[in-house]
Image (spheres, helix red, strand yellow):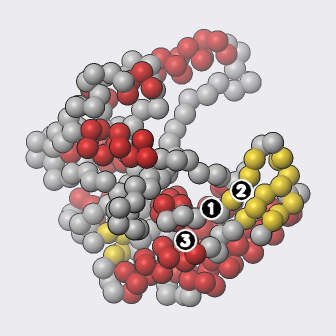
């Protein structure tokens, strides 16, 4: 039916967030205090669900950052793919042809509880100017103008954070060629964006994601979900304390 990738921690974290997980509580107002709770009920629910799917061979466990996974998508191995709005741009760059003959369609993210509308975020990209720039004003103008003039021809690569683009008359009814000219913005991406309530990341998110990957490998191999999450918790806490954070558990 789909794939449970151990090499894409954003995938699992997003679904855990959707189920109600709050792995971190952190504020820049108090930079040394952080609450860490990765062994929560939402994480347990999500991983138990996926582990059952793996055990019953309803989903694969191929890493999504591999050529095997991409080939499987193109070859019909997977019936569905849970992905962010920029995935069509990624797949098009890997040889998936958009247009009338495209087999792909997009649907709203399934919910853990009937009637819910919990939306999540995998992250995206940004263009910034660092202090090393010799011409920061000019560099900022370039960064701004890269996405300041979105047109219907850019549909399918991402959901723009450029608010004026979202309010353009053409944006909602635009037909996405990757999905065989489905009105993806109107049907899926705009409602998803409107329903997203945000989340809290840690100051050491990349380290944490590496530990999530370790936990996912264990779960995919059939190890107890609780043990994997407890190890994720203890490893993350130990790292945070080693970096000087005051950790609440």
Q: Which quadrant of the structure image shows residue 98?
A: top left
The residue at the far left in this view is 101
In the picture of the structure, the residue carrying the numbered disc 3 is 42
Q: Earlier in the sequence, mark 1 or mark 3?
A: 1
Q: Which quadrant of the structure image shows residue 239?
A: bottom right
Quick one: 89 or 226, which is closer to the camera? 226
Residue 35 relative to residue 41: left or right: right
| Figure check: 244 above or below 160 | below
Quick one: 25 or 151, which is closer to the camera? 25
- Mark 3 neighbour class, 10 Å CA radius: few under 14, some 14 to 19, many 20 or more: some
Which residue is at a point 20% across and 35% down the rendered structure image? 175
Residue 141 in picture, x, y percent from top left:
55, 14
In the picture of the structure, the residue carrying the numbered disc 2 is 25
**Secondary-structure class at tag 3:** helix
Residue 215 in picture, x, y percent from top left:
59, 75
- Tag count in the figure? 3
Residue 162 in picture, x, y percent from top left:
46, 26
In the picture of the structure, the residue carrying the numbered disc 1 is 22
Residue 205 seen in the current view = yes
Q: CA distance from mark 1 to mark 2?
A: 7 Å
- Mark 2 neighbour class, 10 Å CA radius: few under 14, some 14 to 19, many 20 or more: some
Q: Earlier in the sequence, mark 2 or mark 3?
A: 2
| Figure check: 37 above or below 136 | below
Q: CA distance from mark 2 to mark 3?
A: 15 Å
Residue 60 relative to residue 137: left or right: left
Residue 244 in picture, x, y percent from top left:
89, 57
Residue 9 seen in the current view = no
Which residue is at a point 42% across and 41% down the rendered structure image? 194
**Secondary-structure class at tag 1:** loop
């Amino acid at each position: 039916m789909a794939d449970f990738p151990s090499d894409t921690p954003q995938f699992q974290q997003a679904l855990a967030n959707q189920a109600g997980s709050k792995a971190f509580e952190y504020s820049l107002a108090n930079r040394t205090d952080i609450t860490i709770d990765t062994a929560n009920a939402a994480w347990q629910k999500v991983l138990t669900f996926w582990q059952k799917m793996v055990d019953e061979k309803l989903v694969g466990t191929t890493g999504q950052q591999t050529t095997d996974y991409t080939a499987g998508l193109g070859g019909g191995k997977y019936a569905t793919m849970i992905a962010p709005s920029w995935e069509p741009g990624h797949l098009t760059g890997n040889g998936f042809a958009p247009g009338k003959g495209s087999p792909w369609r997009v649907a709203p993210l399934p919910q853990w509880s009937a009637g819910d509308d919990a939306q999540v975020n995998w992250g995206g990209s940004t263009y910034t100017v660092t202090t090393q720039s010799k011409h920061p004003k000019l560099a900022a103008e370039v960064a701004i103008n890269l996405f300041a003039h979105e047109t219907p021809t850019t549909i399918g690569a991402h959901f723009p954070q450029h608010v004026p683009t979202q309010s353009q008359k053409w944006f909602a009814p635009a037909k996405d060629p990757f999905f065989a000219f489905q009105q993806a913005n109107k049907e899926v991406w705009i409602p998803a964006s409107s329903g997203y309530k945000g989340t809290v990341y840690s100051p050491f998110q990349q380290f944490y994601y590496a530990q999530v990957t370790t936990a996912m490998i264990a779960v995919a191999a059939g190890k107890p979900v609780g043990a994997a999450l407890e190890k994720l918790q203890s490893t993350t806490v130990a790292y945070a304390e080693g970096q000087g954070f005051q950790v609440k558990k």
